[in-house]
Amino acid sequence: MTTENELTLTAMLTSSVQLTGLESGEVGIVSLDDLIAHDIGVHPCAVTKPESLSTETTAAIFDALKEADNQTPFAELFVTKLSQLLIAAAATQGDAPLKVCLTSDNSHSRSHLLGAEVEQDEINPAMGLRGASRLGHADYRKAFELECEAIKRARLDAKNIELVVPFVRTFSEAATVIDLLAEQGLCRGADDLKVFMMCSVPSNALLAETFLQYFDGFIVDVEQLAQFTLGQDIENTSLNYMSDAQNDALLLLVKMLLTSVESSNKPCLVYSRFIEDSPRFSSWLQEQGVTHVIS
């Protein structure tokens, strides 16, 4: 019998689609943002600042975290639930790796979560604290530590969990995140832990060879890279006609990423939510030797 939780995980867990139409599914990726938004519903920073919450919000968070006696600290409840979700997701992969993307959602994307009032609104959240910059920021450090604790607990049962660092804009951010992960007991290379970088901005392609020195490989987020290459606003539905994952500028950047990893013996995976709507891009990827797309 399939449970509601298993159905949610299936929706959150994406696997690879083989461009040639043959059997696929050996690569899985899950976002902590998605698990938090859909399975927990509580802002990560709220569980680190319970004294800042109203009585009503506190009660709602206890209810969301399924705690009846209200004795266990928010942080412990949050870590326990998140680690259980990761273990369940990893189990669906069998012996294949599960790539877990660290949190990257901006303040606008998290505004619907319980306790979101603890986070200050940003004027332009898409360009603000996201991914690596958020993980390394002092205001979000405790929430990052809870992420790491959940991952560490999950890896005790699921060694196939690997990490993905999202939205890395500079070498400094890359180095900082790798150091912060090591401080939290998630040292790249230790206990076979691999750490990948999600390529979302043009600087990742332009300076790919140097970025590769900090990571075990790349995952190209096609839609994110297109957004920042072409200056698109993907949150504005009236401008959907401008979205173009097959633009020549985007293809050039993806080509630069693929070329950079070619001689490094490190993988460069492609992640696209709408690959079936991009026939030209699919054909182009096959010409580059890419046979699978995470979708």
Image (cartoon, rainbow, N blue to C red):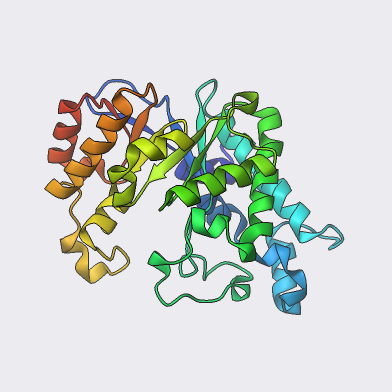
Residue plotted at (46% across, 70% down): 108
142 displayed left or right of 220: right
Q: Residue 91, image x and y in percent?
A: 58, 29
How many tags in the picture? Answer: 0
105 displayed left or right of 66: left
| Residue 227 occupies quadrant | bottom left
Q: Nearer the viewer, residue 48 or 5?
A: 48
Residue plotted at (56% across, 55% down): 135
- In the picture shown, does residue 72 fall above or below 166? below
Q: Residue 130, image x and y in percent?
A: 47, 59
- In the picture shown, does residue 123 fall above or below 49? below
Residue plotted at (62% across, 68% down): 114
- In the picture shown, does residue 257 fall above or below 263? below
Q: Nearer the viewer, residue 267 or 183?
A: 183
- In the picture shown, does residue 77 fall above or below 139? above
Residue 295 seen from this side: no
| Residue 205 occupies quadrant | top left
Residue plotted at (41% across, 35% down): 212
Q: Residue 278, image x and y in percent?
A: 18, 43
Residue 226 seen from this side: yes
Q: Nearer the viewer, residue 127 or 295?
A: 127
Q: Residue 192, image x and y in percent?
A: 60, 24
Image quarter hosting the C terminus: top left
Image quarter hosting the N terminus: top right
